[in-house]
Image (cartoon, rainbow, N blue to C red):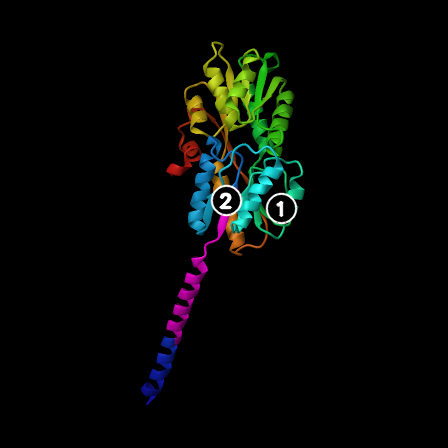
């Protein structure tokens, strides 16, 4: 009799378990049927500088099961132009946007206007705290990168630093990230006894920067504060009879080629792959409501020379997609 009374109870337990598993599977199916969408808005999205960054984002999107759209962009001159692109992304059903602010001027007011309409992750920008709908910030320490470049300029100076002519190619002054790099570089350089002879602002026009460089006498040390500037600096230095020291920041294959060939003496490389991966991962985590608190992250950077180019730890940063 005991066995007979136990059997119906066992059947009920099994039926309940089957119903629970089936319900969970249906819930999972419905939950993943509509994948979350993340749009990425960065300056000149086809620029070589973003290759590793975009690869990192793609990997995170796969891991987090979100739809990732990198919006095609060229050079964005105004914040209102960028705002219009963000508005289109929201209209297309974006659950979150990853933004590199094309200008620091009036950026807080623009971000506040978007409050409550989408979730925002800022990248390559560490001048802003998280606020309202800015749920995360992922960026290198740009001031520290500028300081590291100045230190390398002193290390590779062909004569006492105070006697060297130093030319600088920098990115747009509208970017607070570039202002931080420039400030860090200038202050560190002056503390080491050096001084810049001239500064050229690179606005994405390779021909324009070559024309500006032609107006100046070739310097003893040529400094490039970002990847586009480094590619221009490498091309310029390669064409000159006078041997010069080339120092700066770069991540593209072209910049790495100039280091490997000896045209460039030192590269300060931010971990762009990790910035891309972390930005998507953090934003998706927030959208999925696995995290409610904002997240601020500072990614690392590394100084690489020709003789350390093929060290395993440096290869992992320079060519992370092959890992």
* Residue range highlighted in magenta: 16-40
Mark 2: few, some, or many residues within 10 Å (few <14, many ≥20)? Answer: many
Q: Quadrant of residue 183?
A: top right
State the image coordinates of residue 250 (x, y, percent, origin top left).
49, 28
Q: How many discs mark residues in the rendered view?
A: 2
Q: Is residue 40 left or right of residue 319?
A: right
Q: Which residue is mark 2?
A: 278
Q: Position of residue 245 (x, y in %)?
A: 51, 16
Which quadrant is the N terminus positioned in?
A: bottom left
Q: Earlier in the sequence, mark 2 or mark 1?
A: 1
Q: Are marks 2 and 1 in contact (CB under 8 Å)?
A: no
CA gap, disc 2 and disc 1: 16 Å
* Residue 110 appears in the figure: yes
Q: Residues within 10 Å of mark 1 (few under 14, many from 20)?
A: some
The residue pinned by badge 1 equals: 130
Asked if the stretch drawn in magenta spans residue 28, the answer is yes
Task: Give coordinates of residue 295: x percent, y percent.
Answer: 57, 47
What secondary structure predominates along the stretch shown in magenta?
Answer: helix
Of 297 and 76, the residue lying toward us: 76
Residue under the image location 39 percent in, 69 percent down: 22
Residue at left offset 41%, top offset 61% = 29
Q: Which mark is residue 118?
A: none
Task: Residue 156: tell me if it is visible.
Answer: no
Element carrying mark 2:
helix
Q: Quadrant of the C terminus?
A: top left
Residue furthest to the top: 241
Q: Quadrant of residue 175?
A: top right
Based on the picture, tell me whether residue 137 belongs to the magenta stretch. Answer: no
Helix, strand or loop at mark 1: loop
In the image, is residue 275 above or below residue 186?
Answer: below
């Amino acid at each position: 009799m005991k066995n007979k009374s136990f059997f119906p109870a066992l059947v009920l337990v099994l039926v309940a378990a089957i119903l629970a598993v089936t319900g969970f599977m249906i819930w999972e199916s419905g939950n993943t049927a509509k994948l979350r969408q993340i749009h990425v808005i960065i300056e000149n999205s086809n620029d070589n500088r973003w290759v590793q960054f975009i690869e990192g984002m793609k990997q995170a999107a796969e891991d987090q099961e979100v739809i990732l759209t990198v919006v095609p962009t060229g050079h964005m001159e105004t914040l209102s132009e960028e705002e219009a692109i963000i508005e289109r992304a929201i209209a297309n059903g974006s659950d979150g946007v990853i933004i590199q602010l094309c200008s620091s001027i009036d950026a807080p007011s623009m971000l506040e206007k978007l409050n409550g309409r989408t979730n925002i992750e800022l990248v390559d920008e560490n001048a802003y705290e998280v606020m309202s709908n800015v749920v995360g910030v992922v960026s290198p320490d740009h001031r520290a990168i500028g300081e590291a470049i100045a230190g390398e300029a002193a290390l590779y100076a062909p004569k006492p630093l105070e006697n060297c002519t130093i030319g600088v190619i920098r990115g747009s002054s509208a970017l607070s990230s570039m202002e931080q790099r420039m400030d860090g570089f200038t202050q560190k350089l002056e503390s080491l006894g050096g001084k810049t002879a001239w500064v050229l602002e690179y606005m994405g026009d390779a021909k324009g920067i070559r024309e500006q460089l032609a107006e100046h006498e070739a310097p003893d040390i040529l400094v490039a504060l970002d990847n586009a500037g480094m590619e221009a600096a490498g091309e310029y230095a390669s064409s000159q009879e006078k041997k010069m020291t080339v120092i700066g920041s770069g991540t593209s294959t072209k910049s790495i080629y100039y280091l490997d060939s000896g045209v460039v003496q030192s590269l300060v490389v931010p971990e762009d792959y990790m910035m891309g991966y972390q930005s998507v991962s953090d934003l998706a985590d927030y959208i999925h409501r696995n995290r409610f608190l904002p997240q601020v992250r500072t990614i690392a950077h590394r100084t690489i020379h020709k003789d350390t180019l093929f060290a395993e730890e440096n290869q992992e940063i320079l060519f992370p997609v092959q890992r």
